[in-house]
Image (cartoon, grey):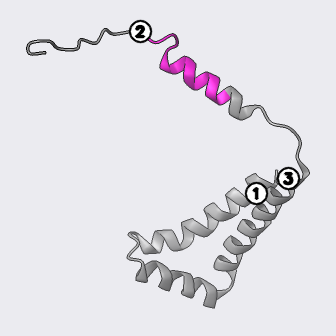
Amino acid sequence: MRGQYRTFTFVPPLTTLHEEMVMTWQSIRRTRHDLVAATIRIGFGILFVMTGGIKLVVPTLGAAFAGQLAVANIPLQDLNRWAVPLIEMAIGKHHNS
């Protein structure tokens, strides 16, 4: 067996990466109406809108959220204290639409 090496020949793929991504995206987008999924999605939307709004409106909860950011060593804490609740509310509105 000495001196014998296995050689591999390159076989070109049948589809390109772009074509595979398009096919995957099309299969993901193929959905059906499902009451359970819709209920869960609406529930999450309401939850996100409520939690984001509460962090902005209720001062003690906003301070508690700021404390959690500080303990977790999240960078840009002042920016995140305001941005995260706004993003939560935007995501919640998106889920409800």
Residue 49 percent coordinates (x, y): 74, 67
Sequence-wise, which precedes: disc 3 or disc 1? 3
Residue 40 placement: quadrant: bottom right
> Mark 1 = which residue?
93
In magenta stretch: residue 70: no
Which is nearer the eye, 15 or 52? 15
Nearer the viewer's eye, disc 2 or disc 1? 2
> Mark 3 = which residue?
38
Q: Is residue 5 above or below residue 82?
A: above
Left or right, 88 with reference to 5: right
Badge count: 3
Nearer the viewer's eye, disc 3 or disc 1? 3
Query: How far separated are the C-alphas under marks 2 and 3?
Result: 42 Å
Residue extending furthest front? 1
Q: Residues within 10 Å of mark 3 (few under 14, many from 20)?
A: few
In magenta stretch: residue 16: yes
Labels 3 & 1 near each other (Cβ < 8 A): no
Q: Which residues are magenta?
A: 13-25
Sequence-wise, which precedes: disc 2 or disc 3? 2
Q: Is residue 96 above or below residue 58?
A: above
Residue 77 percent coordinates (x, y): 44, 74
> Mark 2 = which residue?
12
Q: Secondary structure at mark 1?
A: helix
Query: How far separated are the C-alphas under marks 2 and 1?
Result: 45 Å
**Residue at 65% in and 64% down:** 88
Which is nearer the eye, 85 or 21? 21
Query: How far separated are the C-alphas under marks 3 and 1?
Result: 14 Å
**Residue at 33% in and 10% down:** 10
Q: Is residue 58 above or below residue 42?
A: below
Instruction: Kindly identify the amino acid type of the residue bearing the numbered disc 3.
Output: Ala
Q: Secondary structure at mark 3?
A: helix
